[in-house]
Amino acid sequence: MSQTPSQVQKSTTEKSRPWLFRTYAGHSTAAASNALYRDNLSKGQTGLSVAFDLPTQTGYDSDHVLSRGEVGKVGVPVGHLGDMRALFDQIPLEQMNTSMTINATAPWLLALYIAAAEEQGADVSKLQGTVQNDLIKEYLSRGTYITAPEPSLRMITDVAAYTREHLPKWNPMNVCSYHLQEAGATPEEELSFALATAIAVLDDLKEKVPAEAFPAMVGRISFFVNAGIRFVTEMCKMRAFVELWDEITFDRYGVEDPKFRRFRYGVQVNSLGLTEQQPENNVYRILIEMLAVTLSKNARARAVQLPAWNEALGLPRPWDQQWSLRMQQILAYETDLLEYEDLFDENPAVTRKVEALKEGTRAELAQIESLGGAVGAIDYMKSRLVESNAERIGRIEAGETTVVGVNRWVEGAESPLTAGDGAIMVVDETAERDQISRLEAWRAERDDSAVSKALADLRQAALQGTNIMVPSIAAAKAGVTTGEWGEMLREAFGQYRGPTGVSRHPSNRTEGLDELRAEVDRISDKLGRRVKLVMAKPGLDGHSNGAEQIAARARDCGIDITYDGIRMTPAEIIQSAENENADVIGVSILSGSHVPLVEELMKLRSESKVKHIPVVVGGIIPDADFEKLINCNVSKIYTPKDFELNRIIGDLIQLVEVNVE
């Protein structure tokens, strides 16, 4: 029988092993990222967590038009086997546990990883690690999909079936609820949407592996979750995850062995709550959020990676990442946490909260099931996330939710941590040109006939429904590039644009908007039509929360909106503004590519019929870049500190009125 909190005694058994210590990292080039990885490993990191840049994540080469400004910005560019070799140079892959945060191109990056490991002489069957490989959440919250949900689901299970046979220690899928919370999900939505995704994958995987092997494959499915600032609720959420997963795998799939029903998860704590204002406070937020996934032994993370305190400002420096790593090491090795059994078993408050979360999750799962499961319910889940995020932001604006340094206690001494030119890391501006030149050299030196045959075999596998991994590995060895692999899938399965979750119809949230609505009506009368906002996301950045919330709030204020979602070229944005007779253009970029993309957008605007239309830009934009954007004639610039949506909408209305006059 479990011990009550008052009876917990120090364990006489061996101290529990700590979780894997990881730092999510990658930038600029494969060589630069390799140096960073080896430095982090020398400081006590025990596993690698690879961040890939947006072209790599979305299946484009570095010289594609959509890749402009995105190369090496949010992760490392890996365009071919040569890049993968450089990324893991002097790192023995047979001995490493590597997590690759990759989804749409997961089969391809795993193929490159296998090819690189074989070149090192590794025994592929000993490779350990994870590919995230969760496409469902890409349609809901991150946007790095290549094609439609149905073929994407098939490729998820192709990877799983291949690893069962050839990489038995590899986790073939990491169901990712992290970005769901970043998109505004409630705990019940994070639980249910993630579990529904796992169910969809397992239902499909059942048809691809022998029945006797299926329970072990269930045991290879892992999760990647988020932990927010309400750490008691988050800890209870993790206990609910553990219990619901045990329930689903036993009742739905008949998995009898408890070790195959174990809920295995890694975590990165919440980045959504990191503030640009008083960013030093983020250190405390990160620590508290880490406690949610480490305090409860029965629901403890298997791997933890922590953001850096200054990620709301830009790329963290190696020192910032070291600081986050030290936070984990102090908890694991200086405290006595790992010497005790679970601290919360039979705690009545915890039990009540866990049961309430489970009840709400079961109800949401039933709704998703009625819509055809996770794939059929994508539009429904996306709209729920947009609504939940709007409610979250509304509570912060109204002061119902306190955020220290943002809507309370906003006055404070200037932080010395943010002083000086080196306060954040800036990607070398020559990195993109360097990557493209090496890509061109790679293409020039390879065997074109071998590449053509490999791509033809890949296309045939895609069309015939055979496992995509085998021709992907052959293509990796033949010298195929990431963009060629992605383009072949786009040709085979067709182009796809995911749902935005933003209805054109106003919501019921009109409280506090009367004054703004009246202003919109007044200016619309001057125009002789409704004020028109074209909201856009150029480039490959799929973080669409800001664009969605601006579009939704503008709509609720009576503005006519056009928001077509992610991955718009600057030319397409200007064309949309012309077609829609826009009065103002809003652009949201969070990947750090704001300067080149805005420069191109404004150049095209100056040559168009909408050259007089004001343009506003939002994103994670360092102060040093403000002058560059203003010199491009951008009318307004917003960063994460500008959380008051009503003020932003008010600014847009004023810009339109000035332009009308």
Image (cartoon, rainbow, N blue to C red):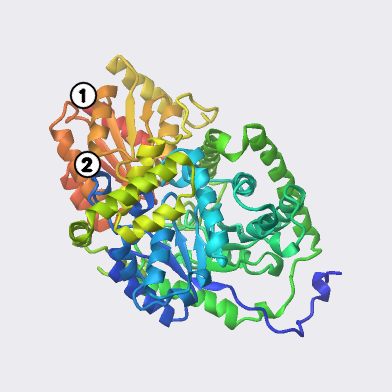
In the figure, is residue 17 to the left or right of 427? Answer: right
Q: Which residue is mark 1?
A: 661
In the figure, is residue 184 to the left or right of 300? Answer: left
User: In x, y percent, where is residue 285?
Assistant: 52, 63
In the depicted view, which residue is nearer to us: 445 or 482? 445
Q: Which residue is mark 2?
A: 634
Q: Is residue 443 above or below residue 425?
A: above
In the figure, is residue 609 to the left or right of 471? Answer: left
In the depicted view, which residue is nearer to us: 161 or 542? 161
Per the model, the C-alpha gap separating discs 1 and 2 is 19 Å
In the depicted view, which residue is nearer to us: 110 or 640? 110
Q: Amino acid at mark 2?
A: Val
- Residue displayed at 16% across by 29% down: 608
In the depicted view, which residue is nearer to us: 321 or 434? 434
* Quadrant occupied by the N terminus: bottom right
Q: Residue furthest left?
A: 607
Label 1: state its secondary structure: loop
User: In x, y percent, where is residue 444?
Assistant: 17, 57
* Residue 102, quarter of the rendered image: bottom left
Mark 2 residue crowding within 10 angstroms, few (<14) / some (14–19) / many (20+): some
- Residue displayed at 62% across by 65% down: 293
- Residue displayed at 71% across by 65% down: 259
Q: Are marks 1 and 2 in contact (CB under 8 Å)?
A: no
* Residue 260, quarter of the rendered image: bottom right
* Quadrant occupied by the C terminus: top left
